Image (cartoon, coloured by chain):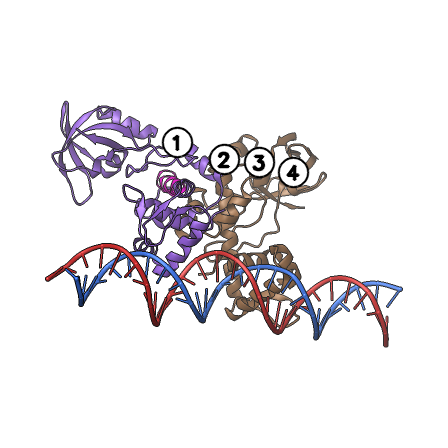
Chain colours: A purple, B brown, C blue, D red
Amino acid sequence: MASQTVENYLKALYNLGDDKGEVNISELSAHLGVSKPTAHSMVKNLFDEGLVHYQKYKPLKLTDKGEKVGALVIRKHRLTEMYLVDKMGFGWDEVHDIAEQIEHINSPLFFDRMDELMDFPQFDPHGSPIPDKDGNVIKNEYLALNQCQVGDVVQLKTLSHSSKDFLNFLDKHDISLGQIMEIISVEVFDKSVIVSYDKHPNELLSQKVCERLLVLKI
Amino acid sequence: MASQTVENYLKALYNLGDDKGEVNISELSAHLGVSKPTAHSMVKNLFDEGLVHYQKYKPLKLTDKGEKVGALVIRKHRLTEMYLVDKMGFGWDEVHDIAEQIEHINSPLFFDRMDELMDFPQFDPHGSPIPDKDGNVIKNEYLALNQCQVGDVVQLKTLSHSSKDFLNFLDKHDISLGQIMEIISVEVFDKSVIVSYDKHPNELLSQKVCERLLVLKI
DNA sequence: GTAATATGTTAGAGTAATCTAACAAATGTT
DNA sequence: AACATTTGTTAGATTACTCTAACATATTAC
């Protein structure tokens, strides 16, 4: 079992990776709030464990094995955040610190149960995909509606996850998958968005709704 | 903040304490699965932190400060076990290992929310009291009904915690606080109990019900 | 192309928690 | 009371993770 520290390094490497999945040690140490020699020595351990590719003075890259562990930590983190918001009534601003701790719980059973209780969400409310039990992620180019700009014309592709109430809400507003809509305005204060579609030229959608609508710009 | 290790030592000292709250180092080391010198050196740290009273060759005793921390760890543990069973559908046999980990999460908010979602249970289903936010426990001599013997005559004193469904169930069976009943038989296989009271000479109560009925022998 | 800056590496040390080996004190047995 | 056993303590080492100081390599600026 990877220690909490190792899990944190792998998660950081996973999150910081650029298009090629490469990260340098300075970035890593800054992100984790440790000194560069500390990060460097830990990277050597990860290398010895076969979790990261390493060559002197070259950027770091996770091995397949390291990437899987990283993805599983992120799975635990994102499932936890979803659960705290959906099932325990926390606000999105409150859940990060708790999830940072719970992500290190070692119990597949526990997280799979969470997953089940939420009906297997594929994306978190920010549109980030939740890796599956094997660490695989659905590569998605989708944006949450609240990440779009005024003037964008977008098509609804996925619901980050659904609940009875949410599906009901969409139904009432004549919104279904495939729906094309235009962003009319974005309210800075409460992050709500006004969209226009079909017979609804001026529909206000709250942040909570927008987070769950994953769209593609067209 | 106490480390996970320190939390585990304090919890152990709290749980192992006899009538006087005294524990010896051998017991402690055996319970925690560490060597005696390890326990000994840790105890010195706890002493330096003012968490335990210590004199050479004398049994250990938690200070008020140490006892409070211990009680709060137990609060987190028992709340978690209740939550896993009540809200996540785990069986009682599955929750211990998960709760052992979650009890170290540092977030009063998280545990208070759990508490609230379960309607502030005062006892866990085994009849053990759940310490409050300040580490105070209701000293109770109550037993869960399933800890009683055939032939015992008992009076219902407290519900370990209540839910709408549970209260409903009790109502339907004419059971209310103060009710006096006699244990007719205990089924070993499923830990159900048959009791007799008032106009119900032969009422079968499942394990789940018995765990929630806290009684006093009379 | 040299100097300045940023990034990466090595060496050496500290802390928390653990261990084994060896010894000391307390307790139990006959 | 003497011996055996259990319990407690000390000394010294180990592992994982962290640090600072000093130095080496790579990158950027002019």
At mark 2, the secondary structure is loop
- Measured along the vertical axis of the image, is residue B52 above or below residue B155? below
CA gap between label 1 and label 4 equals 46 Å
Residue type at mark 1 is Phe
State the residue in front, C23 or A129: C23
Q: Chain of mark 2?
A: B
Residue A36 occupies which quadrant of the picture?
bottom left
Per the rendering, the mark at residue A120 is 1
**CB-based contact (under 8 Å), mark 1 and mark 4:** no
**CB-based contact (under 8 Å), mark 4 and mark 3:** no
Per the rendering, the mark at residue B89 is 2
CA gap between label 3 and label 1 equals 32 Å
Q: Nearer the viewer, mark 2 or mark 3?
A: 2
At mark 1, the secondary structure is loop
At mark 3, the secondary structure is helix
Residue A173, image x, y percentages: 22, 26
Residue for point 59% across, 52% down: B140
Residue type at mark 2 is Gly
Mark 2 or 4, nearer chain start: 2
Q: Is residue B18 visible?
A: no
The residue labelled by disc 4 is B181
Q: Chain of mark 4?
A: B
Horizontal placement of A193 versus B157: left or right? left
- Magenta-span inclusion, residue A84: yes
Q: Give, as a single range, the part of the protein colored magenta.
A: A74-87
The residue labelled by disc 3 is B209
On the same chain, marks 1 and 2? The answer is no
Q: Nearer the viewer, mark 3 or mark 1?
A: 1
- Measured along the vertical axis of the image, is residue A198 above or below residue B150? above
